[in-house]
Amino acid sequence: MEITSIEKENFEYFEPYTGGPLTPEQSALGLIEDDTAIGALVVSEDDGVCTIDSLFVDPGYQRKGGGTMLLNALKECSEELEIRDFLVYYSEDEAITAFLTKQGFTCIQGDEVMTISVNKILSSNNFQKVRGKEPEEGIRCIKDLARKDLNGLKGVVQEAGFPEKLLANEDLDAELSFAAFDGEKPEGILLANKVGENIFVSLLLVEENNQGILRKLLAAFSNALSHHAKKESLLQFVNRNEKLRSTLEKMIGQQFDVTGQTWTGILSI
């Protein structure tokens, strides 16, 4: 099998595997066997973050290393393209998630993606109540944490079933990420990642679903958005709890747009 770049001249050859025409922001790699197109990887890049829009290998050639070849080819050109991290969006595709995990990616899944504009949060009545105020007692910005406190947070993250590397991700925005402490004991954590102009809340954990702690984290986060995010940016949460959406909407004072996709989160290699 061989890898080739998909250009205008050969696009028709690979179109059955790209999911449709490429947009100006997209680029693609094709997989060939005996001069026959058998697969394609379509990506888009924005500010050092690569979104894998589609990855498909003909069923007759799956489990023969073609998908791995496509990903390896992408990794090889990541330094040239100054790509730091990969994001993948799929509908509920367990086979793809299993494949990426096998390739060494860290996958964070959620059943819902909740989207809201930063402007909606900043213009909400609840935000106006906390605007300009310092974080409440026990709430600390990730950028200000000492090593021992970060180590404590790693334990919380791992106990919840998530990889501790979330705290070391290069795209983690430490000025938009906060933790709640009772003395030295971590009680909650909100991690935000900037992806281009938009912001992903990649992790939101609160001990025993304590709404008081959640409210304090959101207040500090909302205030930070006014200093470190553009109003036209989109904010996305991954919903892992049936009550989370209604709780967040009530606290923020605005409704989310919701999709039923599975989000395969920040994928660092």
Image (cartoon, grey):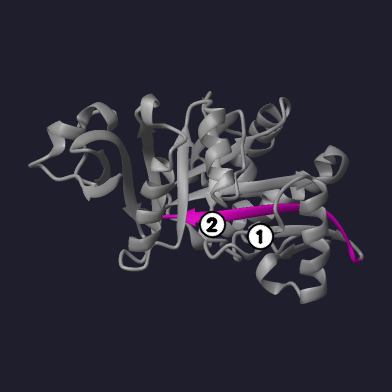
- What residue is disc 1 on? 165
Decide if residue 156 is on the left or right side of residue 143.
right
Q: Nearer the viewer, residue 112 or 140?
A: 112
- Badge 1 amino acid: Lys
**Residue for point 46% across, 52% down:** 86
* Residue 62 numbered tag: none
Point out residue 269 in the picture as x, y percentages from the top left corner.
52, 58
Q: Is residue 186 magenta?
A: yes
Residue 166 seen in render: yes
Q: Measure the alpha-carbon separation of dots 2 and 1.
A: 9 Å
**Residue type marked 2:** Ser
Residue named by callout 2: 268
Q: What is the residue that sits farthest to the left in this orientation?
A: 9
Q: Position of residue 176 (x, y in %)?
A: 60, 59
Mark 2–mark 1 contact, CB under 8 Å? yes
- In the image, is residue 124 part of the stretch drawn in magenta? no
Residue 178 x/y as whole percent: 70, 59
Q: Is residue 256 visible?
A: no
- SS at circle 2: loop
Seen at 63% across and 39% down, the residue is: 252
Instruction: Name which residue lies at 72% across and 48% down.
Output: 162
Query: What percent of the width, then of the height, locates residue 65?
Result: 43, 43
Instruction: Name the quarter where the N terminus is drawn.
Output: top left
**Residue range highlighted in magenta:** 184-196
